[in-house]
Amino acid sequence: MSDHSSETLQRAAEAAEQLIGFYPSIMASDARVYAAGMVKVLAHYPEHLVAEAIDPYSGLPSLHDYPPTMKQIKEFLEPRFRNLCRMREMKERFERAKLPAPPRDMEADAKIRDGFQKLKAVLQSAEPEALAGVTGRRQ
């Protein structure tokens, strides 16, 4: 993936620190390596998704009794990220220029206009009682 800005890495580090803080102790063989790995994983995702992941009520702390593995973090974030990408793509497609309207067919328009004029003439010349069965109205 691409390099991350120092601001993105700083936010990811703060999120990792907060997530680690929700657990009583880290059982990793090297807590610094674990935290650095967590920062690297979290830095790949938008800030609002990271906030979801570290939320103690609905995020990773509510799902795991022990600090989550990098795999568990990705399993939590990837579906949300794919959904976000899908929604962005749908929005972009919706906002993209539409195909131009087809050119008017003057001959077809004339036929339609003539058809409506003939229908109007038939309806105007018909007896009201005859129209009651056609239109469903009673007079």
Image: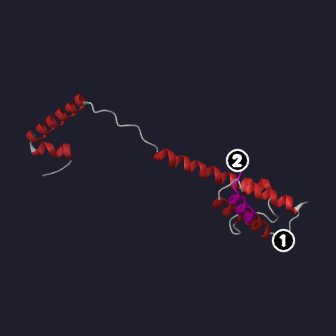
Dominant SS type (magenta): helix
Q: Which mark is residue 2?
A: 2
The answer to whether 126 appears left or right of 55 in the picture is left
Residue type, mark 2 in image: Ser
- The image shows residue 86 at horizontal and vertical percentages of 58, 48
In three-dimensional space, the C-alpha distance between marks 2 and 1, rounded to whole angstroms, equals 33 Å
Q: Which mark is residue 77?
A: none
Does residue 67 show up magenta in the picture?
A: no
Does residue 8 show up magenta in the picture?
A: yes
Q: Closest to the observer: 21 or 135? A: 21
Q: Closest to the observer: 137 or 23? A: 23
Residue bearing the label numbered 1: 24
Residue type, mark 1 in image: Pro
Q: Is residue 56 above or below residue 77?
A: below
Q: Mark 1: give few (<14), some (14-19) or many (20+) Cα within 10 Å.
A: few
For the point 73% across and 66% down, the residue is 14
Q: What SS does tag 1 mark?
A: loop
| Highlighted magenta segment, given as a residue range | 1-15
